[in-house]
Structure formats: C-alpha cells, structure tokens
Amino acid sequence: MGVHRTVYQKTAEVLREQVREALLDHDAFEQKVRACELERCRATCCHDGVYLSQEEVEGIKKLLAENAEQFASYGLTLPEEPIIETRGGRSMKTAIRGAEPDELADDFPRHFPKTRCVFLDKQGRCGIQRLSMEQGREPWFDKPLTCWIHPIVILPVSEERSRPLVTLVSPENDPQKTEEYPGFASCTHCGRLDEGGKKARQVLAAELEMLGEIAGRDILGELNAVPLY
C-alpha cells in the first residue's frame, strides 16, 4: 500500500477508505489543464493555507521543532502559532499572512483574499516540501495530503451518488461555489480548463499514481484504459 510514501499513515488510511471504492469521473480527466508552473501561478492554491488532520498538525509541529533553523534559512518568518484553530475550534489549518503585491499571480482571482500560507517563501515555494527533498525524502512525504492532491477533488456520497467520486471540478459544479464566492479549485491555475494544455489524466499522472497506491488500485491505469463503449 502506498502509505509508505507519506508520513501521515492514519490520514492516508482515511483517504484509502474514501477512494478504494470511489467512482472515477473519466470525462473530467479527459479535460485539458496545464501543469503547475510556479512562475505563472505563484502558488495561488496556497493563498488560504490548508486544513489539517490531527496527525498532520502533530507532524508539522514536530518538523518545526526539529528544523527551526532550516525553515528560517528559507526566509520564512513563522508566527508564534503557525497552526491555528478555525471554524469555532472544530478544525485546524496552517496560518496565513498578508501577501506582498509581487508575490501574487498577475491573474490572481479577485474573490481570493490577498494572503499566503505562512509556509510559502517569497517565490511561492513550500518550505515543508523543500525540507523533505533536502533531507532525502519524497517531495510530498511531509506535505499535508490535501496539498499534493490538488486540484483533484473527492466528492462524498450524496443523494445522487452511492459512492464517492474522484473528479475535477468546473465553474459549474465547484463544491465551494456560492452566490458570493465563484469557487476555489476551479479558479486556481491547475484547476482551470485550458485548451492549450493536455489531458488532466496526463498532467496529473503523478498525483493519480500516488492516490492509486494509497487506495490500493490502479487509478491512473483505469483512467488511461481504452473505453469499451
């Protein structure tokens, strides 16, 4: 099982249970998107930090305690509380800071707050990912699972679906869309449809492969298979 590729074993097990029997939205992964280009997007998807499992909270705190000097060498000035409570204390997430004008993408969505996850440096690089790589681990090993899975979305069981759905969202079905808020994943650079890009199953092959390893199924192979109809 692919949980050996992440330090967050319990969190990966929860993800495994969600994805193991999930439906795959083949049509969504045939849509064209562009690969992550940090120079272009400037980590737009990280503007509001990330929600964390309790295991991820403990893991990041351990990283901070053991590697404070290394994080400082990245130019990160972390607040006293880099992980904060939100939603009335029901959730935990990484803290944010105000963004400087030159840190944001030229087409930064107007409805996104002009903020940054505190673990991003001035170039939009993730300090947690940098640390993992410099210490000889896989890039995503210490990174929260929600971070590396983006822009893939796992929609839960609903009245319309008896099983979860692994998909990419669009401006029409973005689960975070409201009358006042146009959405999140569908508004980030790698989550937007882009006719100049490539098929999502190709662009997101690494993410789909790791998700499949965690789930114990060949998700990428299933999406690449020739349809029988």
Image: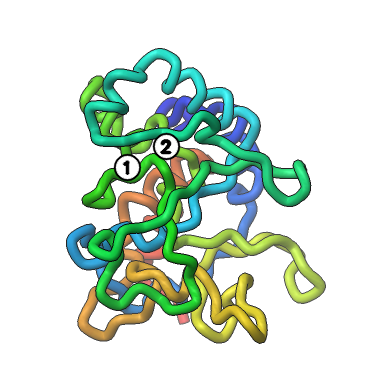
The residue beneath circle 1 is 126
Determine the residue positioned at 61% across, 77% down: 177
- Please identify the quarter of the rendering in which residue 53 is found: top right
- Which residue occupies the foreground of this view, 20 or 80? 80
Residue farthest along the left direction in this orientation? 39
The amino acid at mark 1 is Cys
Q: CA distance from mark 1 to mark 2?
A: 9 Å
Q: What SS does tag 2 mark? A: loop
Is 57 left, or right, of 7 in this rendering?
Answer: right
Q: Quadrant of residue 35?
A: bottom left
Residue annotated with mark 2: 143
**Residue 78 at x, y percent in the picture:** 41, 33
Image coords of residue 204 (percent x, y): 33, 59
For the point 51% across and 83% down, the residue is: 171
Amino acid identity at mark 2 = Lys
Horizontal side, residue 82 vs residue 52: left or right: left
Name the secondary structure under disc 1: loop
Q: Are marks 1 and 2 in contact (CB under 8 Å)?
A: yes
Q: Is residue 8 visible?
A: yes
The residue drawn where x is 47% and y is 82% is: 229
Q: Which residue is more in the foreground, 76 or 143? A: 76
| Residue 202 shows up from this direction | no
Left/right of residue 96 with respect to residue 220 in the rendered view: right
Percent x, y of residue 196: 21, 82
